[in-house]
Image (spheres, rainbow, N blue to C red):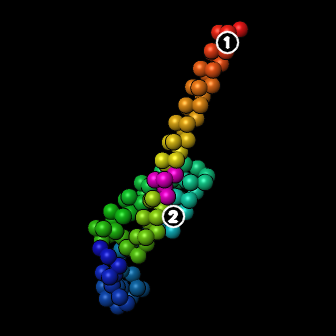
Amino acid sequence: MSWQSIPSKGEDMDEFGNTGLKPHRGGMLLAFGILGFFCCIIFAILAWVMGNSDLKEMAEGRMDPSGEGMTKAGKIVGMIACALAVLGLLLWIGLFALGMTAAVAQGMHH
């Protein structure tokens, strides 16, 4: 579903202007992605998982597609934050192992 298929005013809308589609959560997902990048990894995971789900619903026509860009951006920022967190964890484990190896080697010489 593309943005061109969103009904214009009066077309397939009720008297309150509702289209019957779920509202998008693009802004929230982008905020979650940014929070996951700078603050807490759980937000990045949520942005990735929820962004995936919302993009699927948009493609199936069940969610307002006007927030597709922000949803994609939030998902991508969440993915990058997760990847950097994993790389940071691996680097930390590697440095810890290197430090332990050095400590054991130095202990053998004394």
Residue type at mark 1?
Gly
Q: Residues within 10 Å of mark 1 (few under 14, many from 20)?
A: few
- The residue wearing badge 2 is 30
Question: For the point 30% across and 81% down, which residue is it?
Answer: 5
The residue nearer to you, when weighing 51 against 81, is: 81
Chain part drawn in magenta: 77-81
* Residue in the image at 31% along x and 88% along y: 11
Farthest residue, direction bottom: 10
Res 25 visible: no
User: What secondary structure is found at the residue carrying circle 2?
Assistant: helix
> Is residue 49 within the magenta segment?
no
| Residue most extreme to the front | 109
Could you say where residue 46 lies in the image, as x and y percent from the top left? 47, 54
The residue depicted at 36 percent of the width and 70 percent of the height is 63
- Depth-wise, is mark 1 or mark 2 nearer the camera? 1
Q: Secondary structure at mark 1?
A: helix
Residue type indicated by callout 2? Leu
User: Which disc, if any, is residue 107?
Assistant: 1
Where is residue 59, by image quadrant? bottom left
Res. 105 image quadrant = top right
Label whose residue precedes the other's in the sequence (1 or 2): 2
Q: Up-down: is 17 above or below 95?
A: below
| Mark pair 1, 2: CA separation | 50 Å
